[in-house]
Image (cartoon, rainbow, N blue to C red):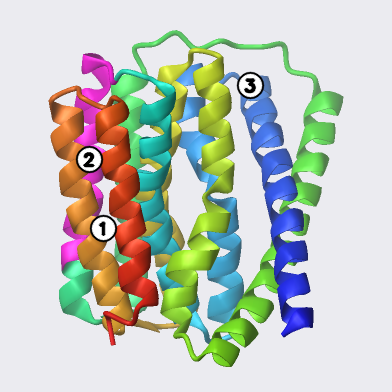
């Protein structure tokens, strides 16, 4: 028990630190190529902060343990909609009307996919290819909506670009190493406690892998960059359930068990609560407490065996 716990903690340290470097170098590379700040915030940073989920999804699927990845992805989305937005509401921020349509589209988009997942009971290569196409369509839609903003171009320095790219690849390699440690240790711990891999993924791993989003959002709020904070969270939600889950299901089919269905239903409820608050532009301390309480209920349901 002690060794898996140590490896799990060490894996999280490596994963989170490497993820931070991955996000930083991704942003630096995008700026070097002249991509607009809005695209960086809503798309690139969201993809960057989803690297932990992506790495765990790939590693666990290669090991034939897709339920761990599935639980992690759905649990991460629940954490984003409730815990992270709840904490952000306590800190204090206001949803801007001009971003409301993008927020609603993204959350409703993922909720529709969740409904299909509940009835599918299994995701395979067909779902994977379809979800990746949906992800591309989402990116294209965001780009089309934001192309009216002026792109900030920087002089291209090939040596600087190559250096950034080298650092980025090294960061990604460390993320994969951390994900390998986490996947193996989490599987051993779940077996010791008699918990399903979906439950472990939706609780323990989900909290850990959403730390990059949390740290980016707190930093963005401190800099008064509300759009970056909202864009990162919403973008990560879409990325998790389309691109990441799609890649994982292509590598190995994933069977959705009772715990997975419970997590999906909870995500739908969380989406509804969040959309209600967002549509009414109300996300203050009171709403933040409700969202955090919703996440605590989710953890209780998952860990108490309500899905069994």
Crowd band around label 2 with a 10 angstrom C-alpha radius: few (<14), some (14–19), many (20+): many
Position of 255 relative to 18 (above/below): below
Query: Magenta span covers which residues?
Result: 95-115
Which quadrant: the C terminus? bottom left
Mark 2 or mark 1: name the one nearer the start of the chain: 1
Position of 206 relative to 164 (above/below): below
- Which mark identifies residue 31? 3
Magenta-colored stretch includes residue 98: yes
Residue 302 in sight from this viewpoint: yes
Which residue is under mark 2?
274
Q: CA distance from mark 2 to mark 1?
A: 10 Å
Q: CA distance from mark 1 to mark 3?
A: 34 Å
Q: Viewer-proximal residue, 188 or 49?
A: 188
Position of 104 relative to 53 (above/below): above
Quadrant of the image occupied by residue 222: top right
In the image, what residue occupies the spot 77% across and 57% down? 174
Which secondary structure class fits the magenta region best?
A: helix
In the image, what residue occupies the spot 29% across and 24% down? 284
* Secondary element at tag 1: helix
Which quadrant: the N terminus? bottom right
Q: Viewer-proximal residue, 91 or 26?
A: 91
Crowd band around label 1 with a 10 angstrom C-alpha radius: few (<14), some (14–19), many (20+): many
* Secondary element at tag 3: helix
Which residue is under mark 1?
267
Quadrant of the image occupied by residue 226: top left
In the image, what residue occupies the spot 26% across and 27% down? 283
Q: Do the numbered discs 2 and 1 sit on residues whose CB atoms are within 8 Å?
A: no
Magenta-colored stretch includes residue 308: no
Q: CA distance from mark 2 to mark 3?
A: 32 Å
Residue 209 is situated, as x and y percent measured from the top left of the image, at 56, 55
Q: Viewer-proximal residue, 206 or 299?
A: 299
């Amino acid at each position: 028990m002690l060794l898996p716990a140590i490896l799990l903690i060490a894996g999280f340290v490596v994963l989170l630190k490497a993820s931070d470097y991955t996000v930083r170098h991704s942003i630096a590379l995008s700026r070097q190529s002249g991509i607009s700040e809005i695209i960086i915030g809503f798309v690139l940073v969201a993809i960057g902060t989803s690297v932990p989920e992506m790495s765990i999804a790939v590693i666990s699927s290669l090991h034939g343990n897709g339920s761990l990845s599935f639980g992690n992805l759905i649990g991460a989305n629940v954490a984003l909609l409730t815990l992270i937005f709840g904490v952000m509401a306590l800190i204090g921020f206001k949803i801007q009307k001009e971003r409301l349509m993008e927020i609603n589209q993204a959350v409703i988009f993922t909720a529709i996919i969740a409904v299909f997942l509940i009835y599918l009971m299994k995701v395979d290569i067909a779902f994977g290819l379809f979800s990746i196409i949906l992800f591309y369509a989402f990116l294209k839609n965001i780009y089309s909506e934001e192309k009216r903003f002026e792109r900030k171009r920087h002089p291209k320095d090939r040596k600087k670009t190559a250096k950034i790219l080298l650092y980025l690849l090294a960061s990604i390699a460390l993320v994969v190493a951390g994900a390998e440690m986490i996947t193996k240790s989490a599987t051993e711990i779940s077996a010791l406690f008699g918990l399903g891999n979906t439950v472990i993924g939706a609780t323990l791993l989900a909290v850990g892998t959403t730390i990059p989003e949390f740290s980016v959002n707190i930093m963005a709020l401190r800099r008064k960059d509300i759009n970056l904070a909202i864009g990162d969270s919403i973008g990560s939600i879409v990325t998790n359930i389309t691109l990441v889950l799609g890649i994982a299901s292509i590598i190995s089919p994933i069977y959705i068990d009772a715990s997975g269905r419970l997590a999906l239903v909870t995500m739908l409820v969380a989406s509804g609560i969040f959309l209600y608050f967002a549509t009414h532009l109300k996300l203050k301390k009171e709403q933040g407490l409700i969202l955090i309480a919703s996440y605590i209920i989710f953890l209780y349901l998952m860990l108490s065996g309500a899905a069994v």
